[in-house]
Amino acid sequence: MSEPYNDLKQVDMSIQSAQRIIGHATMSMDPGQLHAAKEALNTAKQQYNEILNQQTGMDGMFLENARETLEQCEQQINQALKQ
């Protein structure tokens, strides 16, 4: 039986998933995929914001990296949606 993922791992997995979806969507430029990518990003951001309010001193580096990744993803998807 496997152990449940902790909150940080869930946020990390959500961000990685959003990155992959955004990458595929921006390569194909399919409107449906772009919409799904934006939704995946919003979900990852929501999970990030929830964990941000619960952070401990040990989470600082992870949260900073996660914030930067989310910002990059948001820029990428916003650029694709403008085209």
Image (cartoon, grey):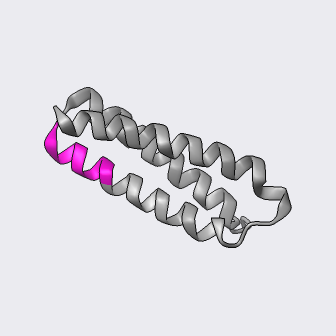
Q: Quadrant of residue 57?
A: bottom right
Can you name the residue that lies furthest to the top here?
A: 27
For image coordinates 81% across by 66% down, the residue present is 56
Q: Position of residue 20 (x, y in %)?
A: 43, 38
What segment is highlighted magenta in the picture? 30-38
Quarter the C terminus occupies: top left
Q: Position of residue 28 (x, y in %)?
A: 22, 29
For image coordinates 37% across by 42% down, the residue present is 21
Compared to residue 65, the image places residue 28 above or below, namely above
For image coordinates 23% across by 50% down, the residue present is 35
Q: Quadrant of residue 74?
A: top left
Q: Is residue 12 magenta?
A: no
Q: Position of residue 25 (x, y in %)?
A: 28, 37
- Left or right: where does residue 46 sit relative to residue 12? left
Can you name the residue that lies furthest to the right here?
A: 57
- Return the residue nearer the eye: 42 or 9: 42
Give the total of numbered labels.
0
- Left or right: where does residue 42 sit relative to residue 64? left
- Left or right: where does residue 60 sit relative to residue 21? right
For image coordinates 38% across by 37% down, the residue present is 75
Compared to residue 59, the image places residue 19 above or below, namely above
Quarter the N terminus occupies: bottom right
- Left or right: where does residue 10 sit relative to residue 21? right
Q: Position of residue 68 (x, y in %)?
A: 57, 41
Q: Main secondary structure of the magenta part?
A: helix
Compared to residue 3, the image places residue 71 above or below, namely above
